[in-house]
Amino acid sequence: MLFWIICVVLALVVAGLVVAPLVRGVQAAGVDPDVAFYRAQLDELDRDIARGTIDAAEGERARVEVQRRLLAADARGGQELKGGVSRGLAIAVVVLLGAIGLAGYFSLGAPGYPDLPIKARIAASDEMRANRPDQATMQAAALPPLAPDVPDDYLASVQQLRTLVPTRPDDLRGWELLAYHEAQMREYPAAVAAQAHVIALKGDAATNEDRRLIVDFMVTAADGLVSPEAEVYIRQILDADETDIAGRYYLGALYYQTDRSDVALRMWKPIVADGDPEAFYVAAARRQIEDAAFRAGVKYSLPDVRGPNAADIANAQDMTAADRQEMIRGMVGQLAARLADEGGPASEWARLIGAYGVLGEVDKATEVWLEAQEVFAGSDADIASLRAAADAAGVAK
C-alpha cells in the first residue's frame, strides 16, 4: 500500500509541474523590459525636476506622456500572460500521463514484487544453488514413474541380474547391463547406483558417455531437477569437452532452475543454433530457451528448423510415390544449396547425407560425406556424428 501512496504523490507532483505552465500561460522571466524602461524614465524626470534641470511645467508634460506609455506597456504584458490552455485540456493531459505511466508499469514492472537489485538476485541464486537438496532427497520427493508393461520372462531376467550382479563387484559388463535394464524398468535410483559402480570400476578410463548416462538417470530420478551430485558429473563432462551438448544442456538447466536464466540462455543458445533439433538435449533446450530469454529480459526467437528431417519424410508417406519423391528432392535440394552457399553445422551436413541415403543417391551422399570430412576435420565429435549418418546411408566406407 505504501508503494502505491508514494506513486500517487509523485504522480500528482509531476502532473502539477507539467500542467501549471499550461494553465497560467508562458511567462517571461523577470519584469517586462518596456515597463522597466518607462519606470526608469519617470525616476529620471523626478530627479531632473528636483535639481531644476528642466522646467516644472515641461517636466509634468513629459511625466504624463511617460506614464501613458507605461500603462500601455503594462497592459500589453498582462494580455501576454493570459495565453494558457483550457482547464479541460489540462485535465486531459494529466489523465493521459497517468494512463501512460500505469500501462508502462504493468507492462514492464512487477506489481507486488519487492525491489530486487541484480547483486541481491545473483546472491539469492547462489544461495539457492548452494543449499538445494541432495540427490537422495530429490529422489525421495519425486513422483514414482508408471511401471512399464514388460513380459514376465524379461522381468525374471532383470530380477536375476539384480540378484547376481551384486555378488560380482568387479564384473564391469554385469554392472553396465544392470544399469541399463534398471533404467528400462524405470527404476532410476537403482540405475543411478549401478552406473555409479560402473564409473568407479572404470576409474580414469570412464568416458563422457558414462557420465552423460548417469546424469540422465539422476535427473530423471529427481523429476527433472539437477542435484549437487549430478552437477559434479556435468562439470566433469564440460571439463573434458566444453562443447558437449549434454553438459551444456544440463548446466543450463541447473541455472534455469535456480533463477539465473541469463546463464541458461548463454549455455543453450549455441546448441539450439547448431544442434540437431531432433536430438534429445537440443529439443529439451528448444522447449525452454524462449522462456529463459524472457526471464533474462532478452529478445530471442527460436531459429527455424531448416531442411528435411525424419518427421518430414514420415509425413510424406500418405502421398503418391511420385509426389513424395518430388517433395523430398525439393527439400534436399534446398538444404544442399544452402550448405554450399552459407555452410552450416555438422548436424545439417549429417542430415543431408542421410537424406541422400533415403533417396538412394549414393554418389551424392558419398560426395557430401567426403566434403564434410574436410570441413570438420578439426572436430572429432562432429566427425563422429557425420560418420554415423554416413554409416546409416551406407557410404562410410
Image (cartoon, grey):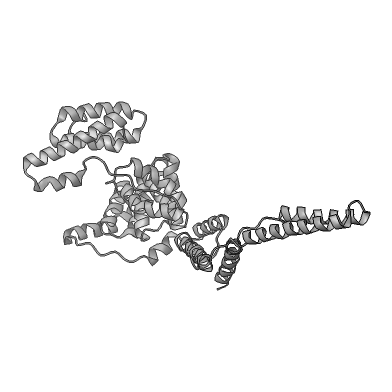
Determine whether, in the image, residue 357 is placed left or right of residue 280. Answer: left
Q: Is residue 37 above or below residue 15?
A: above
In front of the other: 217 or 124: 124
In front of the other: 317 or 148: 317
Could you say which quadrant of the image residue 147 lies in? Answer: bottom left
Could you say which quadrant of the image residue 17 lies in? Answer: bottom right
Q: Position of residue 285 (x, y in %)?
A: 35, 50
Q: Is residue 91 above or below residue 383?
A: below
- Number of numbered discs overlaid on the protein picture: 0
Q: Quadrant of the N terminus?
A: bottom right
In front of the other: 386 or 151: 386
Determine whether, in the image, residue 263 is placed left or right of residue 180. Answer: right
Residue at the limit of the structure toward the right, as seen here: 51
Q: Does residue 203 appear in the picture of this structure?
A: yes
Q: Quadrant of the C terminus?
A: top left
Residue at the limit of the structure toward the front, as seen here: 57
Q: Position of residue 89 (x, y in %)?
A: 50, 65
Q: In the image, what residue occupies the spot 31% across and 31% down?
A: 342
Q: In the image, what residue occupies the spot 28% across and 52% down?
A: 180
In front of the other: 327 or 391: 327
Q: Position of residue 363 (x, y in %)?
A: 16, 27
Q: Position of residue 35 (x, y in %)?
A: 73, 56
Q: In the image, what residue occupies the spot 37% across and 56% down?
A: 219
Determine whether, in the image, residue 123 is placed left or right of residue 289. Answer: right
Q: Does residue 247 appear in the picture of this structure?
A: no
